[in-house]
Image (cartoon, grey):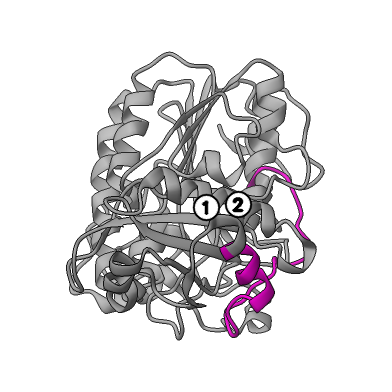
Amino acid sequence: MTMKNEKKYRRIFTIVIDSWGFGSAPDSDLYGDEGADTVGHIADSVSHLDLPNMQKMGTFNLKHIRHMDPVDHPTGYYLKLREHSNSKDTMTGHWEMMGLYIPEKFVTFTDTGFPDDLIAELEKQTGHKVIGNKAASGTAILDELGERHLETGEMIVYTSADSVLQIAASEETFGLDELLRCCDIAREITMEPKWKVGRVIARPFVGKKKGQFERTPNRHDLALKPTGRTVLNSLKDAGYDVISIGKINDIFVGEGITESHKSNSSVHGMEQTIEAAQKDFHGLCFVNLVDFDAKWGHRRNPKGYGRELERFDVKLGELLPYLRDDDLVMISADHGNDPTWTGSDHTRELVPLILYSPSFKGSGLLREGDTFSDIGATIAENFDVEMPEYGTSVLKYLI
């Protein structure tokens, strides 16, 4: 396939199925992830998997899995991408998609919890005592410490395998505004290099006792700013629309975003994407669907992950009728999170890039990419904006 596609797309929808890995990356052994396979192990763990819209696009021509056969005449193009940066973090994955290379991993406190002097400073500046201070599942730590928090007003602080400092507090008693104030303070404190985590996350919840606590949709991520200009900056500076759906705005700290919409679930995120497709915009709609990672990957629930994929496929089918001939859909992932793997960390995997437009005359397999930045390079070439330093556009193959 060498014919150049001279026609530019007016709208590009880039949809990130958060953590949808397609098998171990070549360097996965360096991360303890050799043999990880998010989509393959999900398929092996469920009695059925029905993803007809992704199947038609050729997704399972790219990766053969149980339940989903390849198709003879796919409607899309597809390839696998390798992460170039030295991480398997959410922010690193998304930043690399938009043209950055992140050579160093963010600081994590998984094994030890946060240092005493950090916690002491957090308590001093917020006026609240801290409990927890360990790596934990967000739901498990609420069952463990939620009732104590309600009685004492102490903040629940915890981390994970990611570079995050999370603060959980009751919306009803502690208050959302107070939680966000404390998270702002935590973000400032953790700007010191020795404590610099990728994200501070507010984790509000409701409920009165163990077994009844539920996290609310009012999560808020306070991330570090990207390490340089991204394709999003170039698009915005050139006057294009850059619509964020889900946690994209948080990941990029608003850099390069012209319009932002929070989602309360992955299904809601797709409904917002469908709404955007019914409007006339010119530029990029960038979507993150976090439930795959947060609800199912980290909690090691392959059956829940499989059902979430089916819900996504239904919504994808609802999006397709609203696509115009000059629209392009790009479906990918930011890392893996194999729900059958040990621990609760992300997994270092190849990720898919599925491309579809109603105007395609061709389809099929493209070459494997050496960086997630191929996504940003394709977007940049399409809109004739500054090309990122990393990445190679696949636009010329889309005929």
Q: Indicate left or right for 81 with 193 as reference.
A: left
Whether residue 187 is visible here, answered yes or no, is yes
Is the C-beta separation of discs 2 and 1 under 8 Å?
yes
Which residues lie in the magenta part?
Answer: 97-123
Few, some or many residues within 10 Å of mark 1 (<14, 14–19, 20+): many
Q: Amino acid at mark 1?
A: Cys
Residue 189 sits inside the magenta stretch: no
Q: Amino acid at mark 2?
A: Ile
Query: As drawn, which residue projects farthest toward the right?
Result: 389
Q: Give the quadrant of residue 385.
A: top right
Q: Is residue 60 above or below residue 157?
A: above
Residue 152 spot, x, y in % from top left: 34, 68
Give residue 182's mark: 1
The residue nearer to you, when weighing 313 against 232, is 232
Residue 315 spot, x, y in % from top left: 26, 41
Q: Secondary structure at mark 2?
A: helix
Q: Is residue 349 above or below residue 53?
A: below
Q: Indicate left or right for 46 with 27 as reference.
A: left
In terms of secondary structure, what is the magenta stretch mainly? loop
Q: CA distance from mark 2 to mark 1?
A: 5 Å
Image point (39%, 69%), residue name: 297
Q: Which residue is mark 2?
A: 185
The residue nearer to you, when weighing 136 against 326, is 136
Q: Give the quadrant of residue 278.
A: top left
Image point (42%, 43%), residue name: 177
Image point (39%, 74%), residue name: 137
- Looking at the rendering, in which quadrant would you find the N terminus? top right
Whether residue 1 is visible here, answered yes or no, is no
Few, some or many residues within 10 Å of mark 2 (<14, 14–19, 20+): some
Image point (72%, 44%), residue name: 99
Residue 104 sits inside the magenta stretch: yes
Q: Indicate left or right for 297 with 24 as reference.
A: left
